[in-house]
Amino acid sequence: MSLPLTQLPGVSTRIAELFARLGILTVDDLLFHLPLRYEDRTQIKPLATVKVGQTVLIEGTIQASEVKQGKRRSLVCTLSDGSSTIILRFFHFYPAQQHQLQAGAKLRCFGEIRQGYSGLELVHPQYERINYSPVHNPLADHLTPIYPSNAHLNQSVFYTLIEQILTTQDIVDYIPIQIQHQFKLLPLTTALQLLHQPPPTVALAALQSSTHPARRRLAFEELLAHHLSLYTLRAQAYHRQAPSLNNRGQLGQQLLAQLPFQLTAAQQKVYAEITTDLRATHPMQRLVQGDVGSGKTIVAALSALQAIESGYQVAVMAPTELLSEQHMRTFSQWLQPFAIEIVWLTGSLTKKKRDQALANLASGQAALAIGTHALFQKEVEFARLGLVIIDEQHRFGVHQRLALRNKGSSSGYYPHQLIMTATPIPRTLAMTAYADLDTSIIDELPPGRTPVNTAVIPNTRREEVIERIRYACQQEDRQAYWVCTLIEESEVLQYQAAKDTAEQLHQALPQLRIGIIHGRMKAKEKEKVMAQFQGGQIDLLVATTVIEVGVDVPNASLMIIENAERLGLAQLHQLRGRVGRGVLPSYCVLLYQLPLSDIAKSRLATIRDTHDGFAIAQKDLEIRGPGEVLGTRQTGTMNLRIADLQRDQDLLSDIIHAAKMLFNEYPEHCQHLIQRWVKEGLHYGEV
């Protein structure tokens, strides 16, 4: 089944190259290249019974044939089957074809019935000349599949090769009969036969809509293979050596003692799980999910101290400079009493500062590195990397995280990994996409946090909203955000939108101190503006979505999100999480432009009525699909050919159980399934 296509009779190097352009390299690949649709060529339709819009197979004899001049020159043939007649019309024809389609020629034609000027027509039908002999012109005994192809590969090549594979090759089913029965799965050969050569009686709508048991069987197997690849990598991780960060936890206790708040029960539970993991001699691989404002950062800081107390270094990676700056400030404040050297690595550092930071990391003098993707560049070396903390993990490509993990392996150890996300992922989806990770959930907000009151308001009431800002900032001594959004990803356009909005607000609110922050600003400029906002020297901060994560200003209790209908649920929820950080009643206004699509209405209603991040994530999954919920790079690595995480999510629970059975009882089948479906994605779970 994993044979290259060139091993099949009739496949030349040229044909193999054409198949390779479609991603088809092996016999397996061709078998799992499923038809887009099907045509019924199993029965001849009498011309007296055909109707406009039907796609039919007909037979008859040409009664007359002529070239007609008009707006477009065409070859017109009148075909009769004895019961009625129909016109065959060809706009593109050549002399040999005209000679072939003379009166008396017997044809079998396939095409869509259309209404013409003088009756029913077939325009450019597929046809073959016949002699009415069942021996020489047998009808198909199954529906005719139409495969996704390119201009150089015609359908007959697919028919010939797939027929050859189904009749001569051994199709190995790696899902044992016991598991097939338990989860009501068709045998693989039966499923493939049905999909490539379905009988005329098949439920065609189900077959084409992916609800047919044959398609479900292949979707199940593909998702199972991806799940097994992660499950296998997780098992392999237990055989790798990691430093045992086993100490008395004195630094962590000292940090807890100096905090002005106590950990919630959920934070304590997750911290205990991480502590246990870090004491083990195999690498921790733990995903911590926590809603906006649930307090993941303090758990990360406590985990970092456990590594540092054992004499190891920690790397904290964030997706944006702004979030890495926020972490730098927060960690520096918390860890200041312990005289721990922290370096900050981003792309905007001067060469002198960067060289000094790199030297301190390489020597081990710096115990903690905080930064963006600059952390995994080649010249960054650690003396003893023991723990990697990745924030907002779905924004990083898999290979980026892999590169950071490998920075600890030169010492013979693999660092522990703590992966955090404030984008909750529905449980079953998380168990499938992150089968290589243990999952912890901080499902409790710190006391004193009040839910943010959310209002959905059309842009026609913009002046009322501006007046509300004036009142909040002047009369109530609060601070506010005004978030500008654009469909385009261009930082230039986003900067221009923020700049224009800031100027308009200056004119409308001359008495307020208005600041601006956007992605094109240098790190120092952004840091200065954020420091002024946190210090109360700016009343209203106009920002792009760069402030989506990491910004914490307790006195900011009002947020306006402009063009809110353009953002996804997860992003709206993240942005809203920038207010409600203190004890003040907080408000989020979603300004939208009319008209609204049904999806936009649904999104805005969900964010207005819901504060539970997991409920929002489930709705996000329904609306936008798993690519957005997990991060497009994440699902892109899964490279699903047949399955669809959203459509087939009802299979996921069974797949988790089936994977455990296969892994424990049929381990030799697991690798075959992974090789069949996952191919190059085997590093996926190693990050």
Image (cartoon, grey):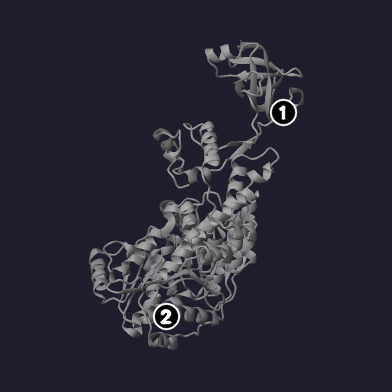
**Residue 52 - label:** 1
Residue 307, compared with residue 432, is above or below; it is below
Of residues 140 and 434, the one nearer the viewer is: 140
Visible in this render: residue 124?
A: no
Of residues 5 and 549, the one nearer the viewer is: 5
| Percent x, y of residue 231 | 48, 64
- Disc 2 crowd rating (10 Å Cα; few below 14, some 14-19, many 20+) is many
Q: Is residue 307 left or right of residue 137?
A: left
Q: Residue at x 48, y 79 (%)?
A: 273
**The C terminus, quarter of image:** bottom left
Visible in this render: residue 223?
A: yes
Residue 397, compared with residue 87, is above or below; it is below
In which quarter of the view is residue 651 placed?
Answer: bottom right
- Disc 1 crowd rating (10 Å Cα; few below 14, some 14-19, many 20+) is few
| Percent x, y of residue 520 | 38, 57
Q: Which residue is mark 2?
A: 302
| Percent x, y of residue 337 | 35, 85
| Percent x, y of residue 611 | 60, 69
Amino acid found under the numbered disc labelled 2:
Leu
In which quarter of the view is residue 657 placed?
Answer: bottom right
What secondary structure is marked by label 2?
Answer: helix
Q: Residue at x 64, y 24 (%)?
A: 135
Of residues 635 and 277, the one nearer the viewer is: 277
In which quarter of the view is residue 617 placed?
Answer: bottom right
Amino acid found under the numbered disc labelled 1:
Val
Q: Is residue 446 left or right of residue 45?
A: left
- Kindly report which numbered mark, 2 or 1, lies closer to the viewer in this rendering: 1
Of residues 81 and 592, the one nearer the viewer is: 81
Of the image marks 2 and 1, the number of the one nearer the N terminus:
1
**Residue 515 - label:** none
What secondary structure is marked by label 1?
Answer: loop
Q: Residue at x 64, y 40 (%)?
A: 198
